[in-house]
Image (cartoon, grey):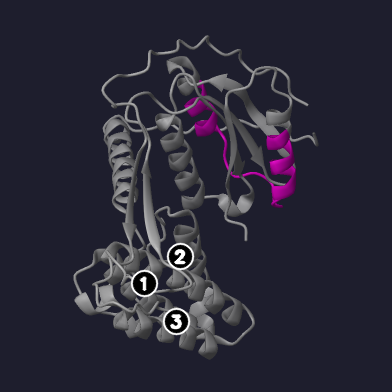
Amino acid sequence: MYQDDESLEPRQISPAPTGGGGRMVLTAQCEAPSLGRGASQDSFAVLVHARAAAAGGGAPLDLVAVLDVSSSMCGNKLSLLKQAVGFVIDQLGPDDRLSVVIFSRYAARLTRLVRMSAAGKAAARSAVGFFGGRQTGTNIADGLRVGAQVLAGRRHRNPVASVILLSDGKDRPLELTCTAAPSMDVESERVRVEAAEDIAAARVKAEGGEHAGAARILESRLRAVERSAPGVAGDEPTCEAIKEELRELSARVGDRREYQKTGRACLLAGMSSHAQQRASGVELQATATSANRTARAYLTPKMEEMVEVSRESRKRGSSEHGDGGSRQVKIHIKEEPV
């Protein structure tokens, strides 16, 4: 159990903003603007958007980054991992705290839970920059166990606690009695949810060796999307992206070799993107059957914004080290079971 976390700074409570600037904003869009007076139906879709108050920052965070540094992560994978952790460090504020845990055959805590002040960020970046690929073996369970111990042993606690793991391990439209036009926003979200369900079903088929069946599921969903109201309109960005995604996934799951090479990664990335509504970082070359198309992950405007922030951060990092060169320092960290 680790009980050496850095103490928290007293937080000053800001006065509540006036004029409604600090209120949460809720907006709702119904499937149809109205129903007939005598109409009756079992379900009615309503899309609700919640926007947090603009004033004030988020709650302080205690974050443990559990990183795979086994021999399989050598080379480009390890470089990408370090860039990802660097981006996370850049996004943390002075009230947030970070601890880094690394694992291969065994797990070890690299840094204690410290506040991300300027000095804390510099220390975290330095620690992450030192380690290299280590022993064979990928003991994810041990890494998560140590990460959980870091959080469980805290003497001081921020309101939010989380663990991130970075490793290479393994149609039913409603019928209305009126003729009102449906809300395109609601229909687009319905299309996305149903597509996500079929992507998961296709993965089950493909993992069972039924690659033709997996492709048929995705092709059937593609036809359903094309028949939907947003699909017929042809100008709804989310729907167009989903159609492109389904075409690409169908081409990658129908063949066993292509599925093992790229299809499984594409399916898992798509499922994660839709389930958590987060952008996917998977970018793959076009397949032989989709040579004229470019794979595109499901994105919302906020996702695109964060991906662009990450890219700009990486460009700045490259330019800062490009002229003077960089020196890689390698240290040996003794691995012991915790």
Q: Which of the pair 27/223 is nearer the observer?
A: 27
Q: Is residue 322 visible?
A: yes
Q: Quadrant of the N terminus?
A: top right
- Disc 3 packing (10 Å; few <14; some 14–19; many ≥20): many
Where residue 112 sits: x, y (%)? 63, 23
The quadrant where residue 256 appears: bottom right
User: For the point 19% across and 70% down, which residue is it?
Assistant: 235
Residue picked out by circle 1: 245
Give, as a three-letter code, the residue at label 3: Leu
Where residue 217 sits: x, y (%)? 48, 84
Q: Which of the pair 330/211 is nearer the observer?
A: 211
- Disc 2 packing (10 Å; few <14; some 14–19; many ≥20): many
Q: Could you tell me if the residues under marks 2 and 3 are in contact, i.e. CB atoms within 8 Å?
A: no
C-alpha gap between disc 3 and disc 1:
10 Å
Compared with residue 262, is residue 105 higher up or lower down, i.e. above or below?
above
Q: Is residue 293 visible?
A: no
The reply to whether the magenta stretch includes residue 86 is: no
Residue picked out by circle 2: 270
Q: Could you tell me if the residues under marks 2 and 1 are in contact, i.e. CB atoms within 8 Å?
A: yes
Give, as a three-letter code, the residue at label 2: Gly
Q: Which residues are magenta?
A: 123-148
Where residue 110 sits: x, y (%)? 63, 29
User: For the point 24% across and 72% down, which residue is it?
Assistant: 181
Q: Earlier in the sequence, mark 3 or mark 1?
A: 3
Residue picked out by circle 3: 218
**Is 17 left, or right, of 334 in this rendering?**
left
Which element carries disc 3, helix, strand or loop? helix
